[in-house]
Each structure stands twice: as C-alpha cells, then as structure tokens.
C-alpha cells in the first residue's frame, strides 16, 4: 500500500485506485484469461493439494481403439522443480509417461525413466516425436472435440486433474499400435 502525506481527498483517490487494482487482479485470476479450453490448474479435490503446475493447449490424438497419446505444455509457476511420475485417464486403463529416443540408430518410443521433470519457473512440452502421455488400450473412443480427463501424480504423491480435447492429427507419422512402443 502507498502511504502519502497528501491531502485527504488525494489519499482517498489513491486508496480507491489501489482497491480497484486489487479487485481487477483478483477477478483476472478467477476469470477467463484467454487460455485455451485445455488449460487447467491443479484440482481442488480433497486428495489433491495445490501444486505450482498448470497445463496449456492439452490435446489427445483421435483414435477409435488401440493406443493414442496426449500432448501440450506443462508449466511450473513455482520455485521448485516438479516431477510427474504417473498419469491416469478416464479413457484408458493403462498409461505410461513416454519419450521418443534414438536407440541403436533408430527412433523408438519407450517409457520415460524417472518421470517428467518440469524445472522451477519453466515449461516442458509434450509433443509428437517427443515426450508424451501414452494411452494404451483405450476403452472410450477419442473423437475430435471429445474432452478426456487426466490425473497427474507427482513424485511427492500430490495430484492434479485436467482435461484435454480430442484432435485429428496426421503429422509425424506416429504409430501407436501394440508392439511399437519399445
């Protein structure tokens, strides 16, 4: 708060301006800030505890059955690294954190050892041909526009929930079929 020795009328205006700015900041934090529909903040469920992690532009490659994957950006707004060690989804009973790496001169999909660490104040992109949330044996078809719910579990046992939208995507020539994931 600004303390001034100004005349009372000016002091009221400064205090009023400060109150308006504080209200605007609070409303901005609660309102639609232009983030895409897939943006989310940590879940407020009783088992989840607030984390400094958010997601942006989360999407799932459409698939009627078999395997698919989720992509987007993980944002760490906190002052300490955050490591995601597990992912679950309403559409798939089995999930793994995956990476695409060069193995014996060839690109291969495989589980990401140690999870996915998002540095303090940094981001980590989940993308085709890179790190992603692998969904195996999907039980609910993912069609364009379908919302899929995910829960991430962190190394400290805390969780967060978010949704991602189904999206048709043919780029990258990914093949999420049994026997191709390492």
Image: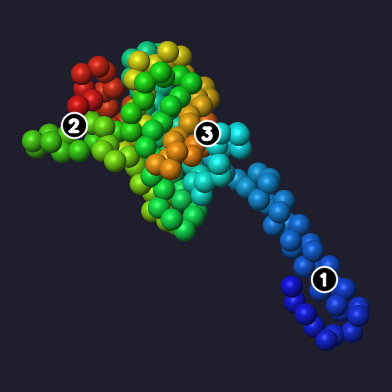
Q: Name the residue under label 2.
A: 108
Measured Cα–Cα span from mark 2 to mark 1: 60 Å
Q: How many marks?
A: 3
What is the residue that sits farthest to the bottom in this orientation?
A: 5
Location of the C terminus (image quadrant): top left
Classify 10 Å Cα crowding around label 1: few (below 14), some (14-19), many (20 and above): some
Q: Tags 2 and 1 in contact by the CB under 8 Å rule?
A: no
| Dot 2 or dot 3, earlier in sequence | 2
Task: Answer above or below: position of 25 versus 84.
Answer: below
Q: Where is residue 81 in the image (x, y as percent from the top left)?
A: 40, 52
Measured Cα–Cα span from mark 2 to mark 3: 29 Å
Q: What element carries label 3?
A: strand
User: Is residue 153 or residue 170 the one in the foreground?
Assistant: 153
Does residue 66 appear to the left or right of 24 in the view shown?
A: left
Q: Position of residue 51 (x, y in %)?
A: 52, 46
Can you tell which mark lies on residue 161?
3
Q: Residue at x 46, y 51 (%)?
A: 76
Measured Cα–Cα span from mark 3 to mark 1: 39 Å
Classify 10 Å Cα crowding around label 2: few (below 14), some (14-19), many (20 and above): some
Task: Answer above or below: position of 141 versus 37.
Answer: above
User: Is residue 148 or residue 79 the one in the foreground?
Assistant: 79
Q: Position of residue 79 (x, y in %)?
A: 47, 58
Q: Position of residue 139 (x, y in %)?
A: 42, 13
Q: Which residue is drawn at 79% across and 64% down?
A: 19
Of badges 2 and 3, the one in the foreground is 3
Q: Tell me if I can see residue 21 in this picture.
A: yes
């Amino acid at each position: 708060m600004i303390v001034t020795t100004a005349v009372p009328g000016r002091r009221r205006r400064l205090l009023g301006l400060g109150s308006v700015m504080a209200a605007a900041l609070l409303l901005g934090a609660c309102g639609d800030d232009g983030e895409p529909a897939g943006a989310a903040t940590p879940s407020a469920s009783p088992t989840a505890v607030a984390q400094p992690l958010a997601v942006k532009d989360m999407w799932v490659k459409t698939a009627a059955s078999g395997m698919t994957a989720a992509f987007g950006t993980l944002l760490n707004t906190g002052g300490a690294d955050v490591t995601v060690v597990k992912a679950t989804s309403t559409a798939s009973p089995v999930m793994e954190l995956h990476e695409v790496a060069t193995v014996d001169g060839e690109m291969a999909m495989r589980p990401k050892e140690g999870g996915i660490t998002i540095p303090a104040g940094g981001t980590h992109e989940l993308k085709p041909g890179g790190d992603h949330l692998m969904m195996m044996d999907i039980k609910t078809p993912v069609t364009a526009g379908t919302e899929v719910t995910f829960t991430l579990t962190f190394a400290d046992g805390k969780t967060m929930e978010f949704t991602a939208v189904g999206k048709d995507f043919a780029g990258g020539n990914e093949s999420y079929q049994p026997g191709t994931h390492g």
